[in-house]
Protein backbone atom coordinates (compact mmCIF):
# COMPACT_ATOMS: atom_id res chain seq x y z
CA UNK A 1 0.00 0.00 0.00
CA UNK A 2 1.50 3.41 -0.92
CA UNK A 3 1.53 6.39 1.45
CA UNK A 4 -1.44 8.08 -0.24
CA UNK A 5 -3.81 5.17 -0.12
CA UNK A 6 -2.81 4.51 3.48
CA UNK A 7 -3.75 8.08 4.25
CA UNK A 8 -7.15 7.64 2.60
CA UNK A 9 -7.94 4.55 4.62
CA UNK A 10 -6.84 6.31 7.83
CA UNK A 11 -9.22 9.25 7.22
CA UNK A 12 -12.27 7.32 8.32
CA UNK A 13 -14.74 9.77 6.92
CA UNK A 14 -12.83 12.86 8.03
CA UNK A 15 -12.68 15.22 5.06
CA UNK A 16 -12.61 18.98 4.85
CA UNK A 17 -13.48 21.63 2.26
CA UNK A 18 -11.46 24.72 3.13
CA UNK A 19 -11.59 27.88 0.98
CA UNK A 20 -12.39 25.83 -2.12
CA UNK A 21 -9.94 22.95 -1.57
CA UNK A 22 -10.83 19.45 -0.42
CA UNK A 23 -8.39 17.37 1.63
CA UNK A 24 -8.18 14.96 4.57
CA UNK A 25 -9.21 16.84 7.71
CA UNK A 26 -5.86 16.20 9.39
CA UNK A 27 -4.03 18.01 6.56
CA UNK A 28 -5.94 21.31 6.83
CA UNK A 29 -4.24 24.41 8.25
CA UNK A 30 -5.33 27.96 9.04
CA UNK A 31 -3.16 30.98 9.83
CA UNK A 32 -2.33 31.98 13.39
CA UNK A 33 -3.86 35.41 12.74
CA UNK A 34 -7.16 34.02 11.54
CA UNK A 35 -9.78 36.14 13.27
CA UNK A 36 -11.67 33.05 14.32
CA UNK A 37 -8.62 32.01 16.35
CA UNK A 38 -7.80 35.48 17.72
CA UNK A 39 -11.25 37.02 18.28
CA UNK A 40 -13.81 34.21 17.83
CA UNK A 41 -14.93 36.48 14.98
CA UNK A 42 -17.10 34.00 13.11
CA UNK A 43 -20.26 31.92 12.98
CA UNK A 44 -20.93 28.21 12.49
CA UNK A 45 -23.41 25.43 11.82
CA UNK A 46 -23.52 21.75 12.80
CA UNK A 47 -25.71 19.31 10.89
CA UNK A 48 -26.20 15.58 11.00
CA UNK A 49 -25.66 13.23 8.08
CA UNK A 50 -28.19 10.44 7.65
CA UNK A 51 -27.56 7.91 4.91
CA UNK A 52 -24.85 10.24 3.67
CA UNK A 53 -27.17 13.25 3.37
CA UNK A 54 -27.08 16.40 5.52
CA UNK A 55 -30.49 16.78 7.12
CA UNK A 56 -32.06 20.25 7.03
CA UNK A 57 -29.24 21.73 4.98
CA UNK A 58 -31.50 24.47 3.61
CA UNK A 59 -32.58 25.55 7.10
CA UNK A 60 -29.01 25.42 8.42
CA UNK A 61 -27.70 27.55 5.55
CA UNK A 62 -30.53 30.05 5.99
CA UNK A 63 -29.60 30.38 9.67
CA UNK A 64 -25.94 30.72 8.69
CA UNK A 65 -26.89 33.59 6.42
CA UNK A 66 -28.76 35.28 9.28
CA UNK A 67 -25.88 34.74 11.73
CA UNK A 68 -23.33 36.09 9.22
CA UNK A 69 -25.51 39.13 8.45
CA UNK A 70 -25.86 39.81 12.19
CA UNK A 71 -22.08 40.20 12.50
CA UNK A 72 -21.70 42.11 9.19
CA UNK A 73 -19.96 39.23 7.47
CA UNK A 74 -20.67 38.57 3.80
CA UNK A 75 -20.77 34.93 2.69
CA UNK A 76 -18.37 34.25 -0.20
CA UNK A 77 -20.82 32.05 -2.14
CA UNK A 78 -24.53 31.46 -2.40
CA UNK A 79 -26.48 28.88 -0.42
CA UNK A 80 -27.02 26.58 -3.41
CA UNK A 81 -23.31 26.37 -4.12
CA UNK A 82 -22.58 25.65 -0.47
CA UNK A 83 -25.27 22.96 -0.33
CA UNK A 84 -23.82 21.30 -3.44
CA UNK A 85 -20.27 21.39 -2.08
CA UNK A 86 -21.43 20.01 1.28
CA UNK A 87 -23.13 17.09 -0.48
CA UNK A 88 -20.00 16.47 -2.56
CA UNK A 89 -17.89 16.38 0.58
CA UNK A 90 -20.38 14.06 2.27
CA UNK A 91 -20.20 11.75 -0.76
CA UNK A 92 -16.42 11.84 -0.61
CA UNK A 93 -16.46 10.94 3.09
CA UNK A 94 -18.56 7.82 2.32
CA UNK A 95 -20.18 8.25 5.73
CA UNK A 96 -23.72 7.16 6.40
CA UNK A 97 -24.00 8.62 9.92
CA UNK A 98 -21.90 11.68 10.57
CA UNK A 99 -21.48 15.32 11.39
CA UNK A 100 -20.96 18.21 9.02
CA UNK A 101 -19.37 21.10 10.89
CA UNK A 102 -19.28 24.41 8.99
CA UNK A 103 -17.53 27.58 10.09
CA UNK A 104 -16.90 30.97 8.57
CA UNK A 105 -14.57 33.58 10.06
CA UNK A 106 -13.62 37.09 8.98
CA UNK A 107 -10.36 35.77 7.53
CA UNK A 108 -6.71 36.07 8.35
CA UNK A 109 -5.05 39.48 8.71
CA UNK A 110 -2.84 41.57 11.03
CA UNK A 111 -4.41 41.54 14.48
CA UNK A 112 -6.68 44.56 14.84
CA UNK A 113 -10.12 44.80 16.41
CA UNK A 114 -11.32 46.77 13.38
CA UNK A 115 -12.68 44.66 10.52
CA UNK A 116 -10.18 44.13 7.69
CA UNK A 117 -11.15 45.26 4.19
CA UNK A 118 -13.18 42.31 2.80
CA UNK A 119 -11.97 43.10 -0.75
CA UNK A 120 -8.39 42.19 0.28
CA UNK A 121 -9.04 39.79 3.18
CA UNK A 122 -11.44 37.02 2.18
CA UNK A 123 -13.29 35.10 4.89
CA UNK A 124 -12.13 31.63 5.93
CA UNK A 125 -14.92 29.23 5.01
CA UNK A 126 -14.63 25.58 5.87
CA UNK A 127 -16.77 22.55 6.46
CA UNK A 128 -15.73 19.06 7.44
CA UNK A 129 -17.19 15.64 8.06
CA UNK A 130 -16.70 13.29 10.97
CA UNK A 131 -18.36 9.98 11.76
CA UNK A 132 -21.09 9.88 14.40
CA UNK A 133 -22.63 6.81 15.98
CA UNK A 134 -26.24 6.16 14.91
CA UNK A 135 -28.80 7.35 17.47
CA UNK A 136 -31.05 5.09 19.55
CA UNK A 137 -34.65 4.70 18.37
CA UNK A 138 -37.25 6.95 20.06
CA UNK A 139 -37.83 5.88 23.66
CA UNK A 140 -34.93 3.42 23.62
CA UNK A 141 -31.94 5.52 24.63
CA UNK A 142 -30.86 6.45 28.15
CA UNK A 143 -32.18 9.65 29.70
CA UNK A 144 -29.83 12.49 30.60
CA UNK A 145 -29.20 14.55 33.71
CA UNK A 146 -29.26 18.36 33.81
CA UNK A 147 -27.55 20.89 36.03
CA UNK A 148 -28.79 24.47 36.37
CA UNK A 149 -26.15 27.18 35.92
CA UNK A 150 -26.49 30.97 35.77
CA UNK A 151 -26.81 32.30 32.22
CA UNK A 152 -23.69 34.44 31.92
CA UNK A 153 -23.71 34.68 28.12
CA UNK A 154 -23.95 37.84 26.06
CA UNK A 155 -27.25 39.38 24.95
CA UNK A 156 -27.32 38.06 21.37
CA UNK A 157 -27.70 34.31 21.84
CA UNK A 158 -29.80 34.05 18.67
CA UNK A 159 -26.55 34.32 16.69
CA UNK A 160 -24.74 31.01 16.20
CA UNK A 161 -21.35 32.48 16.99
CA UNK A 162 -18.18 30.46 17.52
CA UNK A 163 -17.61 32.49 20.73
CA UNK A 164 -18.73 29.62 22.94
CA UNK A 165 -16.64 30.03 26.09
CA UNK A 166 -19.64 30.49 28.44
CA UNK A 167 -21.22 27.37 26.91
CA UNK A 168 -17.95 25.45 27.26
CA UNK A 169 -17.61 26.47 30.92
CA UNK A 170 -21.25 25.60 31.63
CA UNK A 171 -20.97 22.16 30.04
CA UNK A 172 -17.81 21.42 32.01
CA UNK A 173 -19.46 22.58 35.24
CA UNK A 174 -22.25 20.12 34.51
CA UNK A 175 -19.78 17.33 33.78
CA UNK A 176 -17.83 18.06 36.99
CA UNK A 177 -21.12 17.62 38.89
CA UNK A 178 -21.77 14.32 37.10
CA UNK A 179 -24.47 15.80 34.82
CA UNK A 180 -24.77 15.55 31.03
CA UNK A 181 -25.98 19.01 30.09
CA UNK A 182 -26.17 22.49 31.66
CA UNK A 183 -29.38 24.56 31.70
CA UNK A 184 -28.93 28.32 31.55
CA UNK A 185 -31.11 29.99 34.20
CA UNK A 186 -31.72 33.73 34.39
CA UNK A 187 -33.94 35.55 36.89
CA UNK A 188 -35.51 32.23 37.91
CA UNK A 189 -36.38 31.32 34.30
CA UNK A 190 -34.86 28.66 32.05
CA UNK A 191 -33.55 29.80 28.67
CA UNK A 192 -31.90 26.85 26.92
CA UNK A 193 -29.02 24.45 27.49
CA UNK A 194 -25.29 24.77 26.76
CA UNK A 195 -25.57 22.84 23.48
CA UNK A 196 -29.31 22.32 22.98
CA UNK A 197 -32.82 23.78 23.31
CA UNK A 198 -35.03 22.79 26.23
CA UNK A 199 -38.67 21.62 26.18
CA UNK A 200 -41.09 20.66 28.93
CA UNK A 201 -44.44 18.92 28.73
CA UNK A 202 -46.75 20.54 31.27
CA UNK A 203 -50.06 18.69 31.43
CA UNK A 204 -50.71 18.07 27.73
CA UNK A 205 -48.91 21.21 26.54
CA UNK A 206 -45.44 21.47 25.09
CA UNK A 207 -43.61 24.52 26.44
CA UNK A 208 -40.35 26.07 25.26
CA UNK A 209 -38.71 29.47 25.40
CA UNK A 210 -39.86 31.87 22.66
CA UNK A 211 -37.40 32.99 19.97
CA UNK A 212 -35.74 35.97 21.62
CA UNK A 213 -32.12 37.01 22.12
CA UNK A 214 -31.92 34.44 24.97
CA UNK A 215 -31.94 31.30 22.83
CA UNK A 216 -30.56 29.89 19.62
CA UNK A 217 -33.33 29.33 17.04
CA UNK A 218 -32.65 25.60 16.86
CA UNK A 219 -33.44 23.80 13.62
CA UNK A 220 -34.56 20.75 15.61
CA UNK A 221 -36.64 23.02 17.87
CA UNK A 222 -38.50 24.45 14.87
CA UNK A 223 -39.24 21.00 13.45
CA UNK A 224 -40.44 19.68 16.81
CA UNK A 225 -42.83 22.63 17.18
CA UNK A 226 -44.16 22.04 13.65
CA UNK A 227 -44.65 18.35 14.36
CA UNK A 228 -46.38 19.05 17.69
CA UNK A 229 -48.88 21.34 15.98
CA UNK A 230 -49.52 18.75 13.23
CA UNK A 231 -50.18 15.88 15.69
CA UNK A 232 -52.45 17.98 17.90
CA UNK A 233 -50.10 18.62 20.84
CA UNK A 234 -50.71 22.13 22.19
CA UNK A 235 -47.69 24.44 22.10
CA UNK A 236 -46.77 27.44 24.22
CA UNK A 237 -43.66 29.45 23.44
CA UNK A 238 -43.13 31.30 26.69
CA UNK A 239 -40.50 31.74 29.38
CA UNK A 240 -40.77 29.04 32.03
CA UNK A 241 -39.86 29.32 35.69
CA UNK A 242 -37.17 26.89 36.75
CA UNK A 243 -39.39 25.22 39.37
CA UNK A 244 -42.22 24.80 36.85
CA UNK A 245 -39.86 23.15 34.36
CA UNK A 246 -38.37 20.88 37.00
CA UNK A 247 -41.81 19.63 38.04
CA UNK A 248 -43.06 19.15 34.44
CA UNK A 249 -44.40 15.75 33.38
CA UNK A 250 -41.70 15.39 30.74
CA UNK A 251 -38.56 17.33 29.87
CA UNK A 252 -36.38 16.85 26.79
CA UNK A 253 -33.61 18.60 24.91
CA UNK A 254 -33.14 18.97 21.15
CA UNK A 255 -30.17 19.40 18.85
CA UNK A 256 -29.24 18.44 15.31
CA UNK A 257 -26.66 15.90 16.41
CA UNK A 258 -28.83 14.28 19.14
CA UNK A 259 -32.43 14.78 17.87
CA UNK A 260 -34.65 14.58 21.02
CA UNK A 261 -33.24 13.26 24.30
CA UNK A 262 -35.42 12.78 27.35
CA UNK A 263 -34.34 14.13 30.73
CA UNK A 264 -34.21 11.74 33.64
CA UNK A 265 -33.00 14.06 36.39
CA UNK A 266 -32.29 17.72 37.04
CA UNK A 267 -30.07 18.98 39.87
CA UNK A 268 -30.16 15.44 41.26
CA UNK A 269 -33.97 15.21 41.41
CA UNK A 270 -35.99 12.82 39.25
CA UNK A 271 -37.96 14.43 36.41
CA UNK A 272 -41.45 13.13 35.62
CA UNK A 273 -41.71 9.35 35.94
CA UNK A 274 -38.00 8.85 35.41
CA UNK A 275 -38.52 7.30 31.97
CA UNK A 276 -39.05 8.62 28.43
CA UNK A 277 -42.52 10.19 28.39
CA UNK A 278 -45.21 9.40 25.82
CA UNK A 279 -45.30 12.88 24.29
CA UNK A 280 -41.51 12.95 23.94
CA UNK A 281 -41.51 9.51 22.31
CA UNK A 282 -44.31 10.42 19.87
CA UNK A 283 -42.63 13.65 18.84
CA UNK A 284 -39.30 11.89 18.46
CA UNK A 285 -40.89 9.16 16.35
CA UNK A 286 -42.43 11.78 14.06
CA UNK A 287 -39.07 13.56 13.85
CA UNK A 288 -37.34 10.35 12.77
CA UNK A 289 -40.02 9.83 10.11
CA UNK A 290 -39.47 13.38 8.90
CA UNK A 291 -35.74 12.68 8.57
CA UNK A 292 -36.46 9.46 6.69
CA UNK A 293 -38.74 11.27 4.23
CA UNK A 294 -36.04 13.85 3.49
CA UNK A 295 -33.18 11.40 3.03
CA UNK A 296 -35.06 8.53 1.36
CA UNK A 297 -35.39 9.97 -2.17
CA UNK A 298 -31.60 10.05 -2.35
CA UNK A 299 -31.39 6.36 -1.45
CA UNK A 300 -34.05 5.47 -4.05
CA UNK A 301 -31.98 6.90 -6.91
CA UNK A 302 -28.59 5.71 -5.58
N1 LIG B 1 -25.51 22.89 19.17
N2 LIG B 1 -28.81 25.87 21.61
C1 LIG B 1 -27.46 25.87 21.61
C2 LIG B 1 -26.74 26.79 22.55
C3 LIG B 1 -26.76 25.03 20.73
O1 LIG B 1 -25.41 25.03 20.70
C4 LIG B 1 -27.48 24.15 19.87
C5 LIG B 1 -26.81 23.24 18.89
C6 LIG B 1 -28.89 24.18 19.92
C7 LIG B 1 -29.73 23.31 19.02
O2 LIG B 1 -29.74 23.79 17.70
P1 LIG B 1 -30.01 22.83 16.45
O3 LIG B 1 -31.27 22.11 16.70
O4 LIG B 1 -30.10 23.77 15.31
O5 LIG B 1 -28.83 21.89 16.34
C8 LIG B 1 -29.52 25.06 20.80
C9 LIG B 1 -24.73 22.19 18.17
C10 LIG B 1 -25.22 20.86 17.83
C11 LIG B 1 -23.28 22.25 18.55
O6 LIG B 1 -22.85 23.28 19.03
O7 LIG B 1 -22.56 21.28 18.35
Image (spheres, grey):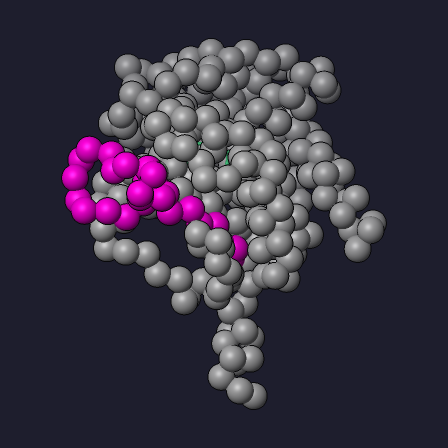
Q: Residue at x 42, y 46 (%)?
A: 125
Quadrant where the C terminus is found in the figure: bottom right
Q: Is residue 138 left or right of residue 107?
A: right
Closest to the observer: 105 or 96? 105
Q: Is residue 58 left or right of residue 146?
A: right
Instruction: Read off the magenta span.
Output: 105-130
- Residue 32, position as x, y percentages in the image: 23, 55
Q: Residue 160: in sight, yes or no?
A: no
Q: Is residue 16 left or right of residue 259?
A: left
Closest to the observer: 164 or 243? 164
Q: Is residue 286 magenta?
A: no
Rendered image quadrant of residue 259: top right
Q: Residue at x 46, y 45 (%)?
A: 102
Q: Is residue 226 left or right of residue 8?
A: right
- Residue 176, position as x, y percentages in the image: 28, 46
Quadrant where the N terminus is found in the figure: bottom right
- Residue 228, position as x, y percentages in the image: 66, 20
Amino acid sequence: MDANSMKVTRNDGEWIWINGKTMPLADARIGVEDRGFLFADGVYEAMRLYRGRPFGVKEHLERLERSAAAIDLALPCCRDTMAQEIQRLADRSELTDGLVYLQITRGCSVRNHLFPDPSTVPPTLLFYTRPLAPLPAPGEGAGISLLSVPDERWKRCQIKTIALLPNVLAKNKAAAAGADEAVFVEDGHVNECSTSNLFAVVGKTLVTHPLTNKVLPGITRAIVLEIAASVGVGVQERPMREDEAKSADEVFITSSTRELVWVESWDGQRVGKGRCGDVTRRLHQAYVERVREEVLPHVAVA
